[in-house]
DNA sequence: CTTTGCCTAAACACAC
DNA sequence: CGTGTGTTTAGGCAAA
């Protein structure tokens, strides 16, 4: 923790000043924030790959804002008074403290990266002014201060920018509240599970999700419905965050990916790419409400819709309905996508038309579907760009949620992520994101958007690319994660998780 | 440069 | 006749 700046609270201090409930609340906040940081970092990395210029700065600004929120939260809790820890809760809080420690570490690294020194300015880093949209180079702090006073003085423009930034923060706060609530619900749900062998340690599993996920996996083998909890990957930031970086995936993606705004074009192997099921499960609300094009091919979506149905067969109209029900994006341009759906149904052999009593229904020929997939592994560099471009950068909340969606995927357990990361030097993340895995999914009884598969049943590609130029600042969030990776002695061995991942080798 | 996969658009046929 | 469904073709883009 040498990097910890003076304003940071150490875990020991935390333990002294906060009650267990406070710690728990803090933990949840921290987790949400950390997750957001991870996600922001992730999308930021993609953003820089997209050469979005000043947009990178906006994302970075968000990152900093979240960090500041996080710190503010710590201070607020501090002001609430001192409550000694109860001995009975100590075991649990130890894990909380560990998490806090880790997240603090992330926080510190982030600040360290951004500011070089604790005394530096949040709007200044790496010799650049971090004012949104401003990339002015400033050799030192003095020059920066001058620049700040000259260029970003109190005028209409700065005020407007500040207002925008306030909206950014507001959106993030709203999102944070939502995510925290979700996390709490997830934790509550997991805690209630009767099969849980460590009833009181439930939150501990946040730090040892491997074992938790293992149980999930054991309990819900392939092809069987899975409870929503299994896809609730955000509860495992400690494991997942670092897992975003992987040296093993370093060599898998070295081509250019700086183009590709627009329609989704991917060719990902199911074996490596992210499952549609878990993606939809985690972000179904997002896709339902945000006018964001889902990062899947029509074929993938159709297949998913069909497999999600009770009988694994749908009429065309039911497929239409599924699209509109699940995706706000498909509530418009109906002519276009409906045509595409029909086109795909007809074109792909994997979709089989079956005459039914009521008429014709469409089913999925799984063998054909798998056949049509080339075994090559590719990333999905266009995904985030698609999402971002689809959203428009102004729609911050949607962008952010896209980041959430994207990052949630990256955070899923991936065997490729289990090797020791050397990611401090890495700066590019690529998430394969295309299709449903070869695992057969099944519909939820309630027909809701709950996940139908546990995430560990999928593996998806997270491709890390080295991009030494232009990415100094953008690599920060990633190296931040990489640093954390090294600092995470997790209760469960990484090996456990890896072993628990059913590799999909059906191709 | 070619191939492949995907998307969009459009034309057309057929059934209700 | 209009609409929905299904098939087919074509052009374009991006990645491999």
Image (cartoon, coloured by chain):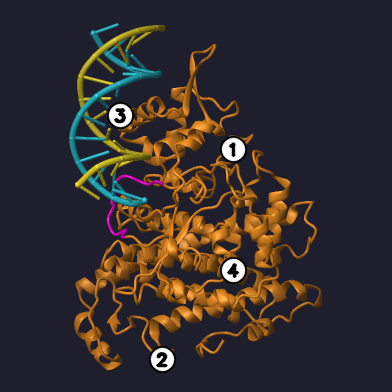
Chain colours: A orange, B yellow, C cyan
CA distance separating discs 3 and 2: 57 Å
Query: On the image, numbered disc 1 is attached to which residue?
Result: A440
CA distance separating discs 4 and 2: 28 Å
Picture coordinates of residue A412 (x, y %)? 55, 57
Numbered disc 1: what chain? A
Q: Are marks 3 and 2 on the same chain?
A: yes
Start-end of magenta stretch: A256-267
- Answer whether residue A263 is magenta in the image: yes
Query: On the image, numbered disc 4 is attached to which residue?
Result: A238
Query: On the image, numbered disc 3 is attached to which residue?
Result: A335
- Of marks 4 and 3, which one's residue comes earlier in the chain? 4
**Where, by quadrant of the figure, is residue A492 drawn?**
bottom right
Classify 10 Å Cα crowding around label 1: few (below 14), some (14-19), many (20 and above): some
In this view, the mark in front (4 or 1):
1
Q: Are marks 4 and 1 in contact (CB under 8 Å)?
A: no
Q: Are marks 1 and 3 on the same chain?
A: yes
Query: Taking the image as drawn, is residue A76 in sight?
Result: no
In this view, the mark in front (4 or 2):
4
């Amino acid at each position: 923790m040498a990097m910890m700046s003076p304003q940071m609270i150490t875990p020991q201090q935390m333990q002294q000043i906060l009650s267990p409930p406070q710690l728990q609340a803090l933990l949840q906040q921290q987790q949400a924030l950390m997750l957001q940081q991870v996600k922001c970092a992730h999308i930021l990395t993609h953003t820089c790959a997209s050469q979005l210029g000043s947009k990178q700065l906006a994302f970075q600004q968000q990152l900093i804002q979240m960090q500041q929120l996080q710190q503010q939260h710590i201070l607020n809790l501090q002001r609430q008074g001192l409550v000694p820890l109860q001995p009975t809760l100590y075991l649990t809080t130890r894990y909380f403290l560990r998490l806090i420690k880790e997240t603090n570490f992330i926080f510190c690294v982030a600040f360290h990266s951004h500011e070089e020194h604790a005394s530096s300015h949040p709007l200044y880093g790496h010799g650049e002014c971090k004012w949104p949209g401003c990339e002015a180079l400033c050799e030192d702090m003095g020059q920066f201060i001058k620049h700040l006073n000259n260029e970003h003085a109190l005028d209409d423009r700065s005020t407007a920018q500040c207002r925008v930034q306030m909206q950014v923060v507001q959106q993030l706060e709203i999102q944070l509240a939502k995510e925290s609530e979700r996390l709490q619900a997830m934790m509550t749900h997991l805690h209630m599970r009767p099969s849980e062998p460590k009833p009181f340690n439930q939150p501990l599993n946040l730090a040892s999700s491997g074992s938790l996920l293992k149980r999930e996996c054991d309990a819900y083998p392939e092809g069987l419905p899975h409870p929503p909890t299994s896809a609730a990957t955000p509860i495992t930031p400690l494991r997942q965050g670092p897992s975003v970086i992987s040296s093993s995936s370093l060599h898998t993606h070295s081509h250019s990916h700086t183009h590709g705004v627009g329609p989704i074009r991917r060719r990902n192997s199911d074996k490596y790419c992210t499952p549609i099921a878990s993606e939809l499960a985690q972000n179904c609300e997002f896709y339902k409400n945000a006018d964001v094009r889902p990062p899947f091919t029509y074929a993938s979506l159709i297949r998913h819709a069909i497999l999600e149905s009770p009988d694994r067969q749908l009429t065309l109209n039911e497929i239409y309905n599924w699209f509109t029900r699940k995706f706000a994006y498909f509530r418009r341009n109906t002519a276009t996508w409906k045509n595409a759906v029909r086109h795909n149904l007809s074109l792909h052999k994997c979709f089989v038309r079956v005459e039914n009593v009521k008429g014709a229904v469409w089913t999925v020929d799984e063998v054909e579907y798998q056949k049509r997939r080339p075994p090559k592994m590719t990333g999905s560099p266009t995904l985030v760009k698609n999402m971002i471009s689809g959203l428009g950068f102004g729609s911050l909340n949607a962008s952010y949620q896209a980041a959430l969606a994207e990052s949630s995927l990256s955070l899923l357990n991936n065997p490729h992520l289990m090797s020791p990361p050397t990611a401090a030097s890495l700066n590019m993340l690529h998430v394969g994101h295309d299709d449903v895995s070869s695992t057969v999914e099944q519909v939820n009884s309630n027909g809701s958007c709950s996940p139908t598969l546990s995430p560990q049943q999928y593996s998806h590609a997270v491709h890390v690319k080295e991009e030494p130029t232009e990415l100094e600042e953008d690599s920060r969030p990633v190296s931040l994660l990489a640093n954390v990776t090294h600092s995470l002695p997790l209760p469960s061995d990484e090996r456990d998780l890896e072993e628990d991942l059913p590799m999909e080798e059906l191709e």
